[in-house]
Image (tube, rainbow, N blue to C red):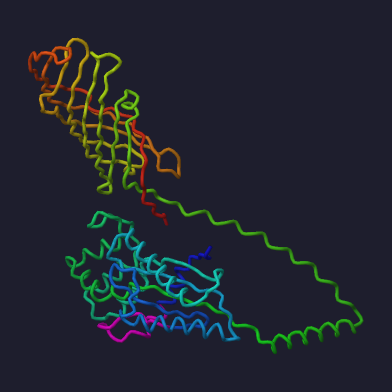
Amino acid sequence: MFAKRNIFTTIALLIAAIVAPTIVSAQDIRLSESWQNDNRHGISVDFRVNSTVIDPNYHNNAEALERIDSLYRKLERDTTYEIVSVGFYGTASPEGSTEINYRLSRNRMLALEKMVRERIDIPEGIIIEDEHYIGWDHLIDLVVADTEMPMRDEVLKILNTEYPSTWGPNGRMVDGRITELRKLDNGRVWNLMLKRHFVHMRNAWVIIVTVRKVAEEEEAAKLLEQEAEEEELEGGSLAMPEPEPTPEPEPEPEPAPEPVERIGLISFKTNALEVAGLIANIGAEVRIAPKMSFDVIGHYSPYDYFKYDRKIRVFAIQPELRYWFGNPLVKGHFVGLHVPVTGFNVQLGDHRYQDPNRAAWGVGLSYGYALPLGKNTGWGVEFTVGLGYMNIVYDVYEGVFNGKYLRTETMNYWGPTRLGIDISYRIDYKKKNK
């Protein structure tokens, strides 16, 4: 297993220290592809937008890859230093969704790691992986250096403020700073940053950390000094008492895990009441806004119930638009507007009732409550009841095989239109609370 460490802050500070001296002008703002600082040595490669493939012909990638190889071998041969870790890090520009940017930064990191390890035999135990995600500190430095940028103060204020995640224009979760930046000057500032700054944020880095070895001469001098001190103590009139052993410090308690907010994206469900009545059904619910979801469930019953004159053959679908007062799909109260549509062929005794190639339809309002089954599971249960109106037109036949048509009737029904105890399984987006 690779050693994994969260060194986001360290890398951000290093990048901030490096960017400033490499700025040429506001029209040529980019991060240096190579640097070294005390015992840290870093080289980066660049990626095209939405790409995780290292193209040697893009920017200075070919030269950077050669420098990685030569730098590692140079440090490996240097007897005054020891390589203690080789870190691989990935970054993405912020125009995509949280999910896409995370995947891009991780895959860029893995692409660089694979290419480097094909060239260099690096011991497993010193490798560090960190999908850096979006380098906001890097973007702040780029904007600070761009003195000709319009509304620069407003942009820096947004970049230095933490906003909760929101739904982006593509219907996916994004960092709240992205939403605020898009609002400036009707999107003109965002489009300028897209051309001027974001191109320099699609990177993957190799960072080699070294420590200086103690020279053999220094080690020998320390041993001679220690032996001289011991001889001086032995020749004295008083023997020095043995020092008391230093008590070992108690281990620090492990930090409590960060709380995680579970944001439901989609759930699949079945109505247990209908299953108990031998009516097969399956449904899905999708979150479409911070407090809104769209639910649809289908029902199918092809059965005769124990006798030829008892049959309930139904095919129905019931879409519903819901507003949630709690956490959508996860927990809380909700109200909904549903539109049931039902085709049927039902016989209960001497008559059979069948829709005349025109499904029954209606509209209703529902109320429900959902709660999860356990803290760290996608399973949940949902209780729903709905009332509404249905317009039902049906043909009446004699209740025998190929029974005679008798008449057509119409019913305007007012009453329950939905009743369910749904068992669901959710797919969540997990966000760490700060």
User: Would residue 430 appear left or right of 324 to someone viewing this image?
Assistant: right
**Tally of numbered tags:** 0
Residue 369 position in % (x across, y down): 33, 34
Query: Which of the two residues, 273 or 12, is positioned nearer the viewer here?
Result: 273
What is the residue that sits farthest to the front in this orientation? Answer: 401
User: Would residue 344 appear left or right of 332 to someone viewing this image?
Assistant: left
The stretch of residues the image draws in magenta is 16-34
Q: Is residue 27 magenta?
A: yes
Residue 313 to residue 330: above or below: above
- Taking the spot 15% from the left edge, 26% from the top edge, the residue there is 390
Residue 77 position in % (x across, y down): 56, 85
Quadrant containing the C terminus is bottom left
Q: Tell me where residue 281 sits by quadrant.
A: top left
Q: Tell me where residue 141 sits by quadrant.
A: bottom left
Residue 272 to residue 311: above or below: below
- Taking the spot 33% from the left edge, 26% from the top edge, the residue there is 273
Query: Which of the two residues, 134 or 426, is positioned nearer the viewer here?
Result: 426
Query: Which of the two residues, 71 or 209, is positioned nearer the viewer here?
Result: 71
What is the residue that sits farthest to the right in this orientation? Answer: 237
Residue 160 to residue 169: above or below: below
Q: Is residue 398 magenta?
A: no
